[in-house]
Image (cartoon, helix red, strand yellow):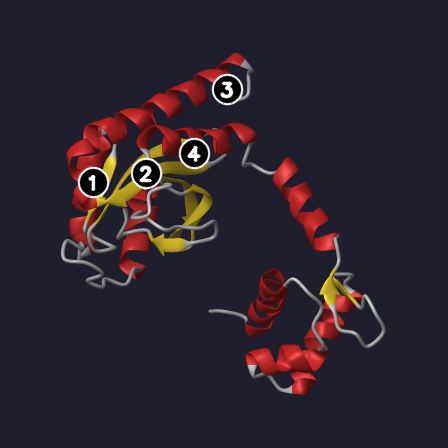
Amino acid sequence: MIVKQVQYAIQILEFFASRRSPATLSEIADHFGWPRSSTFNLIETLSKMGLLYEPKYRGGYYPTHRLLSLAQDMVADGPLSDDLRQMVANIAAKTGETAVLAALSGLSAIFLEVVESSSPIRYFAHVGQRVPLHATSAGRAILSMVSPKERAAVLRKSEYIRFAPAALMTPEEVEAEIELSSKRGWFMNNNGYSPDLLGVAIPLPLKDRQFCLMVAGPAYRTADRVPELVASLREEIDRYMARQVEFGVH
């Protein structure tokens, strides 16, 4: 369930990120088609929290630096280190394809770090993007790290849609694929979620986190390169784990 007030507040911040200039209450309300009274309540709340201000009296509202400061504090002290980000960048550079670091979020895998391929024809992805756990290589890699009981609960709740021709359509099919992939040490999804897209993922179980690394690109360009993609993922994971041991982090 989505809490509308929270969604609207985020949409206002995204609106400013796109606009990059102050906006009046009327401009914001007209942009979203919201009632003036509801828009006023949202703006007033964000203003009182120190997230919006008026650069000029009655000249419109604009975000303060408080949001940036909060984000920087979370990134600096949070679980996504520079080493993890660099690992994603290295994989993208080595393979020429889009690389992703993903984690669990409900029934979805959420992308925490993304470095897109520089190719004009590529897998377009962004930080914050969510994909179904059961239907993707990243999602199934993450599911392999949870207990069988918890995984079964997730698979029962999942919605089985034929996203693409090779989509898995039952919990039993997904569980069998996870078992097979776990034995070989890597997960692949070819034309199973996004048509003509191939993704390869490897679990990254850390001390207090469960991530996975994925590389994905058009199937016509990656289908014959799966061993190379797997090797690139493993090489970066091995380098990362060795560095953690060296510095006593893991």
Percent x, y of residue 243: 49, 17
SS for callout 2: loop
- Label of residue 88 in the image: 4
Mark 4 / mark 2, whichever is N-terminal: 4
Mark 2 / mark 1, whichever is N-terminal: 2
Amino acid identity at mark 1: Arg
Q: Is residue 239 above or below residue 44?
A: above
Assess whether mark 3 and mark 1 are in contact (beta carbons under 8 angstroms). no
Q: Residue at x 17, y 39 (%)?
A: 223
Residue matched to label 1? 221
Amino acid identity at mark 3: Gln
As measured in the structure, the alpha-carbon distance from the residue carrying label 4 to the one carrying label 2 is 11 Å
As measured in the structure, the alpha-carbon distance from the residue carrying label 2 to the one carrying label 1 is 9 Å
Percent x, y of residue 143: 32, 44
- Of all residues, the one furthest to the top in this rendering is 246
As measured in the structure, the alpha-carbon distance from the residue carrying label 4 to the one carrying label 3 is 16 Å
Q: Is residue 185 above or below residue 145?
A: above
SS for callout 1: helix
Q: Is residue 245 above or below residue 129?
A: above
Q: Nearer the viewer, residue 33 or 71?
A: 33
